[in-house]
């Protein structure tokens, strides 16, 4: 009887200890989340603003090229020509955002898929990745809303549909594979160029060029999203939810798949950390670098 009572008391003590540890861990996680928000909130807002700008211009250019009332629609004949112009415009827009003061400070992921991939690679802390992605989603939604207001609803026309991304004629499967491939390629280009001192200054241009190529050649397959926040911003306003899961699953998987072949990136991680103060324009800047003494920005 005494042995049974001791066992019961021991079990109660173990349960209490486990409950106390869980409570402590929960409080620590909450403190980390709040600490990240307190320290890096300007960068999170910058990420929201960057994707907001990107989606604003996406809707503006899509409206100019597709809306029946736009003179460009009648002047530029053919879907291929319109895709070339759309791709070129958005590629230049992406480069301008990356090279902006906001982009240089926040690291300009403006893509939850890329942020998740950097988290998997150990270059971004968990709560920084969470708040980055939160800002990106809010920015994407806000950018479409602002464009709709500025264009007086023209972005909602059936020919524009808020620049929504949808699977093409080959169906959901082809769209999923296409998004995997273009996301993998984009992440590979970012890591390859930004981890090489001679190519690092040109990382924004490589990324912008890829966006232009995707919107020109790949758009008929999936809409060339590579970005969950970009797709959600359009889908929310268009009320079009078909196959949205593709744009939430494929881009992070494609970008994160680069981790399995990133041996060269891991070997150069020490050099990368040393180069951060000089190469702030690189897209993969870790938020942790701003915690070092004397660091003023990311």
Image (cartoon, rainbow, N blue to C red):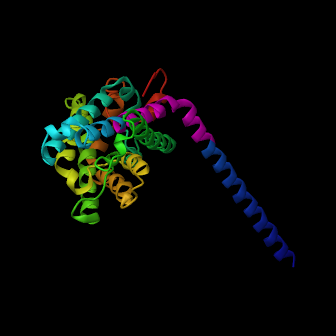
Which quarter of the rendering shows the N terminus? bottom right
Tell me where the magenta segment starts and ends, as one range. Answer: 31-55
Which of 80 and 277 lies nearest the eye of the viewer?
80
Q: Residue furthest bottom?
A: 1
Q: Residue furthest front?
A: 69
Q: Residue at x 40, y 39 (%)?
A: 148
52 within the magenta span: yes
157 within the magenta span: no
Position of residue 274 relative to residue 165, above or below, is: above
Which of 69 and 133 lies nearest the eye of the viewer?
69
Which quarter of the rendering shows the C terminus? top left
Residue 126's x, y, as percent? 49, 45
Whether residue 196 appears in this view of the structure is: no
Which of 160 and 102 lies nearest the eye of the viewer?
160
Where residue 12 sits, quadrant-wise, is bottom right
Q: Residue at x 16, y 48 (%)?
A: 79
């Amino acid at each position: 009887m005494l042995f049974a009572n001791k066992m019961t008391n021991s079990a109660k003590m173990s349960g209490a200890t486990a409950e106390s540890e869980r409570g402590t861990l929960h409080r620590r996680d909450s403190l980390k989340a709040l600490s990240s928000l307190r320290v890096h909130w300007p960068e999170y807002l910058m990420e929201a603003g960057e994707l907001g700008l990107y989606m604003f211009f996406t809707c503006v250019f899509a409206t100019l090229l597709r809306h029946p009332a736009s003179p460009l629609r009648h002047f530029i004949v053919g879907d291929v020509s319109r895709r070339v112009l759309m791709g070129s415009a958005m590629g230049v827009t992406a480069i301008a955002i990356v090279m902006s003061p906001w982009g240089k400070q926040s690291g300009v992921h403006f893509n939850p898929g890329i942020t998740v991939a950097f988290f998997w690679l150990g270059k971004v802390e968990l709560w920084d990745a969470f708040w980055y992605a939160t800002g990106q989603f809010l920015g994407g939604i806000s950018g479409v809303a602002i464009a709709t207001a500025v264009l007086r609803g023209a972005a909602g026309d059936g020919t524009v549909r808020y620049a929504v991304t949808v699977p093409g004629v080959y169906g959901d499967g082809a769209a999923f594979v296409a998004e995997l491939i273009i996301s993998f390629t984009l992440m590979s280009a970012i890591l390859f160029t930004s981890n090489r001192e001679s190519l690092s200054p040109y990382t924004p241009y490589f990324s912008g060029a890829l966006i232009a190529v995707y919107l020109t050649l790949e758009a008929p397959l999936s809409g060339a999203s590579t970005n969950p926040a970009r797709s959600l911003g359009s889908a929310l306003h268009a009320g079009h939810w078909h196959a949205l899961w593709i744009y939430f699953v494929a881009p992070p998987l494609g970008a994160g798949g680069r981790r399995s072949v990133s041996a060269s990136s891991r070997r150069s991680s020490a050099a990368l950390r040393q180069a951060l103060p000089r190469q702030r324009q690189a897209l993969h800047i870790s938020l942790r670098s701003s915690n070092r003494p004397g660091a003023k920005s990311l």
